[in-house]
Image (spheres, rainbow, N blue to C red):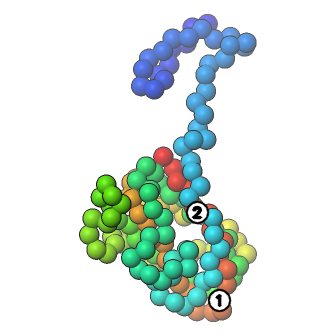
């Protein structure tokens, strides 16, 4: 049987059978792990997922190729915690285009109870394509705890 399909934006015709199936695109190359880290969540303002309170440092750099980031996390406590996501573009040398950050997610309660997994898409709607992101977490009540995180970039 002959089947016509698109491959790399070109129309292609191929004969397929049980012994010569239709080619399948390897989608594993469209997702990259960008960060795996455990953070001590404290009451410190501006602490990012890597533990830095230096407000001009990004948590993630070189993210322009990703339309979306997906943050998976595991909360060891139900202590009240907020997260905030900042983003910015850089020039061809990697220097920020201007000072400061664009806040794409204001301080928002981090979903989940003690010993639960969570998932947050950044941005939550549409596509991102920012060069740098800064993801801050802050405990607003209760005792300090560990927050395990993994962030992947989706092309």
Provide residue 138's location: percent of width, then percent of height.
53, 84
The residue under the point 61% across, 22% down is 23
Q: Which mark is residue 144?
A: 1
Q: Is residue 72 left or right of residue 84?
A: right
Disc 2 target residue: 35
Say which of 103 and 78 sits in front.
103
Q: Secondary structure at mark 2?
A: strand
Say which of 30 and 14 sits in front.
30
Q: Mark 1 or 2, which is nearer the eye?
A: 2
Q: Is residue 125 visible?
A: no
Q: Is residue 31 left or right of residue 88?
A: right
Label 2 neighbour load within 10 Å: few <14, some 14-19, many 20+: some
The residue under the point 67% across, 84% down is 145
Q: Say if mark 1 contacts mark 2, CB within 8 Å.
A: no
Label 1 to label 2, Cα distance in Å?
22 Å
Q: Is residue 94 left or right of residue 27?
A: left
Q: Choose top left, top right, bottom left or bottom right for residue 100.
A: bottom left
Provide residue 40's location: percent of width, then percent of height.
63, 82
Q: Is residue 95 visible?
A: yes
Please determine whether, in this image, residue 22 is positioned above or below residue 151. Answer: above
The residue under the point 40% across, 53% down is 64
Label 1 neighbour load within 10 Å: few <14, some 14-19, many 20+: some
Q: Quadrant of the N terminus?
A: top right
Provide residue 79's location: percent of width, then percent of height.
63, 86
Q: Choose top left, top right, bottom left or bottom right for residue 149.
A: bottom right
Q: Secondary structure at mark 1?
A: loop
Say which of 91 and 147 sits in front.
91
Number of numbered tags placed on the structure image: 2
Precedes in sequence: disc 1 or disc 2: 2
Please determine whether, in this image, residue 142 is positioned above or below residue 138. Answer: below
């Amino acid at each position: 049987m002959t089947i016509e399909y698109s491959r790399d934006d070109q129309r292609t015709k191929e004969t397929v059978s049980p012994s010569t199936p239709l080619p399948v695109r390897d989608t594993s190359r469209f997702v990259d792990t960008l960060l795996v880290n455990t953070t001590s969540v404290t009451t410190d303002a501006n602490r990012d997922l890597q533990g830095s309170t230096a407000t001009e440092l990004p948590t993630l750099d070189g993210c322009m190729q990703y339309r979306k980031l997906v943050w998976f996390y595991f909360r060891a406590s139900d202590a009240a915690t907020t997260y905030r996501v900042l983003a910015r573009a850089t020039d061809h040398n990697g220097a920020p285009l201007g000072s400061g950050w664009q806040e794409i997610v204001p301080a928002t309660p981090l979903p989940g109870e003690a010993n639960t997994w969570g998932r947050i898409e950044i941005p939550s709607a549409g596509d991102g394509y920012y060069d740098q992101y800064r993801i801050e977490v802050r405990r607003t009540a209760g005792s300090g705890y560990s927050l395990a995180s993994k962030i992947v970039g989706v092309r």
